[in-house]
Amino acid sequence: MVGTAGIADVQDEDAPEKRQIDVVALGIVTAAILLFVAIGSQVGPSVVRSLLNRGSGPDNFALNAFLLNIAIIILGWSRYRQLCEEIRRRKEAEWEARRLAETDPLTGFRNRRSFNSGVAALLAANGEDRAVVLMMIDLDNFKQINDYNGHRAGDLLLQECALRITAGLPKDALIGRIGGDEFAVALAFDKYRIDSLDQIAAGLVETVGQPVQVEALRLEVTASIGLARSDVTGSSGEMPDARALLERADIAMYHAKRRGRNSYYWFEAHMADEMRFRTELENGIRAGIPLQEFVPFYEQQIDLQTGCLIGFEMLARWDSPKFGVVTPDVFIPIAEEIGAIAELSESVIAQALEDAKSWDADLTLSINISPLQLRDPWFAQKLIKMLLEAKFPPQRLEIEITESCLHQNIAQVRSLITSLKNQGVRVSLDDFGTGYSSLAQLRSLPFDRIKIDRSFVSSLAENKDSAAIVSSIALLGKGLNLPITAEGIENGDVLEQLLQYGEITGQGYYYGRPQPAREVKEWLGGIELVANREFLESELPRLAPTVPPPDNSGGSPSEPDIKPAKRA
Ligand code: C2E
Ligand code: CA
Ligand code: CA
């Protein structure tokens, strides 16, 4: 058993009562012995005298009392032994029950409750030159591994990590498992030898990060570690207690996570402010979804050769009463982390479908889909159901998925794309060029379009490398017979260069910043591109019974001339 240091020392609270029983039993025996001595001193000599025929024997009463006394001593002693044995067994059972109540059965480490009390005891026992360090160790991608490979593999992985953690710590370290994949360590240390703690933390990051062979599986997790020391005062000058120390180590651990994981950080005061801000954002996101604070903005998509408007890409904005207008780069990763992305996305998509119904029927709507949503085997069905409810023709919808999705479960992505395409929805590969997707992947997935990442396009005019990349992606598109969209067109020079690639669509601040629904609708009304008919029944989606597989301010630098879309 590892890491339970101190549990055996737990005080036996019932001890006084048991000791009383001991004392009573022992008292009876002692009294009986004293009586034995007293009566024996009278009976003994008369027995001896009668044996020597020098007098009469002891009287009957005294002899009986003497024999009774012997019987009491024998009985009392045996009862005393029985009692002692019973108490020993009870103590053992209670100790075992307490150990089980205070230990994590999987790893043998302390559980959260007993870890906290152990830290409090450690803090209380510290002298002048010594302090306590608290380490919070969180496994980075454990949940996915557990979900994907099953709980048995997850348990074995946790046990292996527990062994590695124990091996990387001094013998007297107090170790706890305080959450599913969260371990905590408390250790008294010499205040003047802080380097040794850095070495320990770096060592743990290194060893936990090594691949683990679990039966036939080779699994890899990494660890994010936060450290906090007890001899650093808080903002109001007080020394941290066990709870505050745990909180600090936790904040430092989250900081390590935000800084890319697989590393360790010491707690610093500014991290607490960041954490508070982050918590406010998380709460704001959760509360803002049902209040429809997340709203769609729209960026024009243009046929570069003809200058015609062909549709819009929907880009979500958070119109927060507290933080103002927040861009998706800030809230999408948080929504993904707190598990709110699907709900958020469904809310903005539903609004966008309604908005787009008021546009001209030839204008398309592109929406961005998070890689996390693609993991949902029911995603395609959900999207088709939304189209059906909104009475929106799937042929007008295009979804954009990023290259990073392709590194996940490619079979699932393929079946999802196929389901959507069967319904008429088009699928484009977003941010192409940033995610190292292979040519083989591109060919094996039935994409309808490639979008060249804006980082290459916006620097096209002044950067030779970018120009070379854009040129080769345009060639690749031609070779694979896939239309290309260039995003991030910021000026006329870039547009000029892009025109040499023939048929290509584009979008960017040159054509205007993303606009809210009302402004888009007014503008479209002005150029006569608003809806002028209801959709026919045949244009609407049918829910196929598929089985699921396993910145918005300012204007553009110089307003280009946008023509109405080509009529079909
Ligand atoms: P993206 O899909 O690559 O979207 C294009 C981003 O580039 C948008 O930023 C847009 O405002 C910006 N942009 C457009 N033209 C130009 C230009 O000429 N120059 C420059 N410098 N930037 C330009 P935004 O709106 O901040 O969106 C950022 C990312 O957030 C998007 O990148 C998209 O991946 C994601 N996103 C936006 N809305 C949603 C959503 O509803 N769901 C999901 N899952 N992701 C979304
Ligand atoms: Ca996009
Ligand atoms: Ca993009």
Image: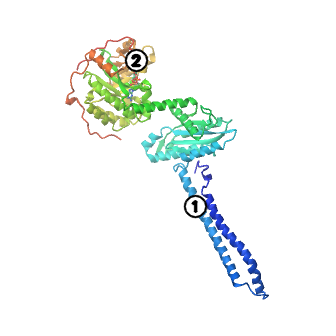
Front residue of 46 and 515: 46
Residue annotated with mark 2 = 553
Q: In the rendering, at what x and y percent does residue 438 appear?
A: 40, 29
The residue to which callout 1 is attached is 90
Q: Secondary structure at mark 2?
A: loop
Q: Quadrant of residue 61?
A: bottom right
- The amino acid on which the numbered mark 1 sits, given as a three-letter code, is Arg
Is 391 placed left or right of 40 in the picture?
A: left
Secondary structure of the residue carrying tag 1 is helix
User: Which residue is at 39% across, 28% downward?
Assistant: 402
- Residue 285 vertical position relative to residue 184 in the rendered view, above or below: above
Crowding near pointer 1: few (<14 within 10 Å), some, many (20+)? few
The picture places residue 349, in percent across and down from the top left corner, at 33, 29
Question: Where is ligand 3, by quadrant?
Answer: top left
Q: Quadrant of residue 302?
A: top left
Determine whether 263 is above or below 563 in the image: below
Q: Which badge, 2 or 1, is on the more N-terminal residue?
A: 1
Q: Decide which of 158, 286 is in the foreground and name it.
A: 286
Q: CA distance from mark 2 to mark 1?
A: 75 Å
The amino acid marked with disc number 2 is Ser
